[in-house]
Image (cartoon, grey):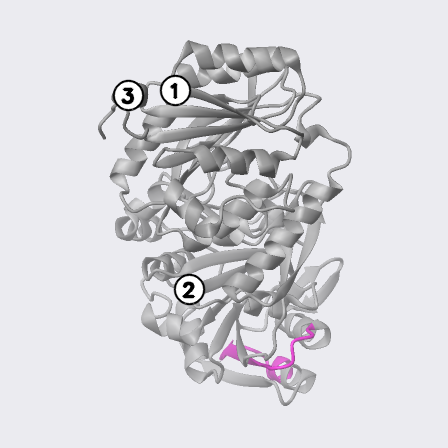
C-alpha cells in the first residue's frame, strides 16, 4: 500500500484517527497524541473533538498539539453534548478512507496503522478491521491481553468483544448512518452491530495494536453503568429486528454480557439419537441404568413439544432396559437394533437413517438434562448458516466438562474443563452463545441436510475424534459451529477416566485436518492441556 503523507500531498489521508475529548487529564492527552504522531504509517489525520469541556488549559493543549503537525485537526463543540455528538462531528469532517476509533486517554502501538493498512491491502473488499488489545494500568505496566476470536457474529450479540482497535471504511459508516443519538456509552456497540450487518468482510488482526488505559476515571470503572447497559440492550433489540431474529435481550452479567432468548413460533420436529448398550453405573451415590435415566430426564424435564427419541441399542442391551425405555414415553421412544462391534459413528449414522426429524441431536446415554428449555435454546440458534450447535456439559461433581472445543498445534481439548460451573471465562467467554471450532457429540444438534452434505460421521473414526472430524467437515462447508452455555446437561463421564486413544486415531485425524488443528480461530486464551498459541 502506498504511503503518501496526507499533509504533504494534499490528497485525502488513508486513515482518520477519530478522538472525542472531554476534560482529559493533560498527561493522558499528551501520551495519546504522541502515540499517533509516532505512527510508522504517515498517511493519517488526527481529528480531536472537544466535547464542550470548557477547560482553558485543555483548549490550549489541543491548540499546541495541532500546531505541532498539520495532520492534527481540532473541532470544538460549544456545549457538552455527549460522546455521540462529539464522535458524529469528527466523522462529519473526516477525510480518511478508513476511520480508526481511539479513546482520549488510550494509546496506539507505533505500527498500529501500518498493520491495519497491510490488512486492508490484503483484504481489498473488507470494511471492518479489529485488533487484539491489552490494558495499561496506573502502575505503568500492561496487563490482561485480550486475544480475540476471528469474526464471531453470534458472540457479538452477546458482548461487544471487538473492543479496540476498530477501524471502519468511512463509506460504510456513511452508508449505515454513523453514530446515532440515544446510545451514549454504547455507541461503539451500536455502530459495530450496524456496520458488521452490512460489511462485505470483517477482518480480525491477531496482534495487540491498542493499549486501553484503566484508571479510576475510566467509564469501565464507574459504579453505575446502568444507562450504558440499557443503551446496549436497545442497540441489540434493534439489531435483532434488522436481521430478522425474533427474541428478547437479557443481561446475564453485571459487566455488559447478554443473552438473546429466541422466540420459536413453531417447533421443528427433533429426533434425539441415543446410542446405548444398557450399561449400569453408580452416579451421585446410587446405581442407575444410565440410558434409562438419561431418557427419563429428557421426557420429564424438557419443555420442547415436538421430538422423538431413537435409541440405538446393541444386541447385549437387556430386554428389561428396552421395556423401561419404551414405557417412559411410548409415543416418543423408538428402539433400533444395532448389530456389530462398538462403533459410535456407525450407531449415530444408523440412528439418523431411522430418524423422522429434519433436525437431529446426538445424545450420549450417560447424560442428564438440567435446563428444561435446552432444546428451545439449541433449536433457536439454528439459523440458515449454522450447521451445528453444542451445549454446556458438567461432570458429576458439577464442575464444567465442555463449553466448546479448542484446537491448536495438532491437539484438541474441551474449553472450560474442570472449572466451576458458574465460571465466567477469561473475558465472559463461558457466558455467551458463540462460534467455536468444534463441539462434542455427547450433545450436538444439527440439521439432517447438513449431516447428509458432509457424509455423516466418519467410519474411519469409530471411537474417538468423530465429533472433531464432524465439526470440521461442517465448518468446511461454510456453516458456523456454535456452543451455548444456556443449554446445560450433566455428562457422567468420569473426570479421572483416561480416554483410550490409539496412535492410529490421532494420526488419522491429524493427517486429514493438519491445517485446521494447527490453530484455533475462536479461542486464543491459554488452555490447560494444550500448548499456548502465539
Q: Which residue: 63% across, 15% down?
A: 25
User: Is 311 within the magenta?
Assistant: yes
Counting from the top left corner in percent of width and height, residue 179 is at 54, 43
**Quarter occupied by residue 260:** bottom right
Q: Give the spatial CA distance, label 1 vs label 2.
A: 44 Å
The residue that mark 3 highlights is 5
Mark carried by residue 136: none
| Label 1 vs 2, first from the N-terminus | 1
Residue of label 2: 385
CB contact under 8 Å: marks 3 and 1: yes
SS for callout 2: loop
Q: Residue at x 46, y 78 (%)?
A: 351
The residue carrying mark 1 is: 71
Confirm whether residue 302 shows in the render. yes
- Quadrant containing the N terminus is top left
Q: Mark 1: few, some, or many residues within 10 Å (few <14, many ≥20)?
A: many
Horizontal relation, residue 48 to residue 431: left or right: left
Whichever of callouts 3 and 1 sits on the residue coming sooner in the sequence is 3
Q: In this rendering, which labeled residue sits more in front, label 2 or label 3? A: 3
Residue 265 vs 410, above or below: the answer is below
Q: Are marks 2 and 3 in contact (CB under 8 Å)?
A: no
Name which of mark 2 and mark 3 comes first in the sequence.
3
Element type at mark 1: loop
Q: Nearer the viewer, residue 260 or 350?
A: 260
Q: Position of residue 172 (x, y in %)?
A: 40, 47
Residue 398 left/right relative to 165: right
| In the rendered image, the vertical position of residue 383 relative to residue 80, given as above or below | below
Task: Quote the CA–CA distance across marks 3 and 1.
Answer: 9 Å
Segment colored magenta: 302-322
Amino acid at each position: 500500500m502506498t504511503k503518501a503523507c496526507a499533509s504533504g500531498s494534499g490528497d485525502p489521508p488513508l486513515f482518520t484517527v477519530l478522538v472525542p475529548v472531554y476534560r482529559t487529564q493533560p498527561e493522558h492527552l499528551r501520551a495519546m497524541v504522541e502515540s499517533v504522531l509516532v505512527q510508522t504509517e504517515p498517511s493519517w489525520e488526527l481529528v480531536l473533538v472537544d466535547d464542550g469541556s470548557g477547560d482553558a488549559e485543555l483548549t490550549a493543549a489541543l491548540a499546541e498539539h495541532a500546531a505541532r503537525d498539520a495532520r492534527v485537526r481540532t473541532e470544538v463543540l460549544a456545549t457538552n453534548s455527549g460522546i455521540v455528538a462529539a464522535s458524529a462531528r469528527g466523522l462529519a469532517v473526516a477525510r480518511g478512507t478508513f476511520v480508526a476509533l481511539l479513546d482520549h486517554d488510550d494509546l496506539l502501538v507505533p505500527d498500529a496503522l501500518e498493520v491495519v493498512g497491510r490488512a486492508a491491502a490484503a483484504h481489498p473488499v473488507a470494511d471492518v478491521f479489529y485488533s487484539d488489545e491489552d490494558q495499561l494500568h496506573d502502575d505503568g505496566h500492561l496487563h490482561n491481553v485480550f486475544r480475540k476470536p476471528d469474526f464471531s457474529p453470534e458472540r457479538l450479540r452477546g458482548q461487544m468483544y471487538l473492543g479496540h482497535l476498530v477501524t471502519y471504511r468511512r463509506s460504510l459508516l456513511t452508508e449505515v448512518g454513523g453514530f446515532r443519538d440515544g446510545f451514549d456509552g454504547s455507541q461503539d456497540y451500536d455502530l459495530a452491530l450496524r456496520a458488521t450487518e452490512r460489511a462485505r468482510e470483517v477482518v480480525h488482526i491477531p496482534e495487540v495494536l491498542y493499549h486501553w488505559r484503566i484508571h479510576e476515571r475510566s467509564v469501565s470503572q464507574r459504579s453505575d453503568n446502568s444507562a450504558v447497559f440499557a443503551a446496549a440492550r436497545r442497540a441489540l433489540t434493534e439489531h435483532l429486528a434488522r436481521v430478522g431474529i425474533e427474541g428478547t435481550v437479557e443481561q446475564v452479567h453485571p459487566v455488559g454480557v447478554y443473552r438473546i432468548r429466541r422466540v420459536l413460533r413453531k417447533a421443528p420436529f427433533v429426533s434425539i439419537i441415543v446410542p446405548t448398550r444398557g450399561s449400569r453405573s453408580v452416579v451421585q451415590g446410587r446405581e442407575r441404568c444410565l440410558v434409562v435415566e438419561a431418557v427419563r430426564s429428557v421426557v420429564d424435564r424438557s419443555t420442547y413439544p415436538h421430538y422423538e427419541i431413537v435409541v440405538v441399542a446393541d444386541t447385549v442391551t437387556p430386554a428389561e432396559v428396552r421395556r423401561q425405555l419404551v414405557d417412559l414415553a411410548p409415543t416418543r421412544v423408538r428402539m433400533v437394533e444395532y448389530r456389530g462391534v462398538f462403533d459410535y459413528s456407525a450407531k449415530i449414522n444408523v440412528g439418523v437413517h431411522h430418524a423422522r426429524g429434519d433436525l437431529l441431536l446426538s445424545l450420549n446415554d450417560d447424560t442428564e438434562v438440567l435446563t428444561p428449555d435446552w432444546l428451545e435454546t439449541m433449536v433457536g440458534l439454528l439459523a440458515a448458516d449454522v450447521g451445528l450447535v453444542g451445549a454446556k456439559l458438567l461432570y458429576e461433581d458439577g464442575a464444567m466438562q465442555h463449553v466448546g472445543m479448542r484446537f491448536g498445534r495438532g491437539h484438541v481439548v474441551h474449553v472450560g474443563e474442570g472449572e466451576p460451573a458458574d465460571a465466567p471465562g477469561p473475558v465472559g467467554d463461558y457466558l455467551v452463545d458463540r462460534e467455536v471450532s468444534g463441539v462434542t457429540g455427547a450433545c450436538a444438534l444439527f440439521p439432517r441436510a447438513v449431516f447428509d452434505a458432509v457424509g455423516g460421521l466418519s467410519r474411519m473414526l469409530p471411537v474417538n475424534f468423530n465429533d472433531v472430524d464432524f465439526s470440521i467437515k461442517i465448518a468446511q462447508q461454510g456453516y458456523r459451529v456454535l456452543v451455548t452455555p444456556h443449554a446445560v446437561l450433566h455428562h457422567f463421564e468420569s473426570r479421572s477416566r483416561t480416554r483410550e486413544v490409539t496412535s492410529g486415531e490421532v494420526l488419522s485425524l491429524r493427517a486429514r485436518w493438519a491445517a485446521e488443528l494447527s490453530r484455533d480461530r475462536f479461542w486464543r486464551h491459554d488452555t490447560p492441556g494444550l500448548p499456548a498459541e502465539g
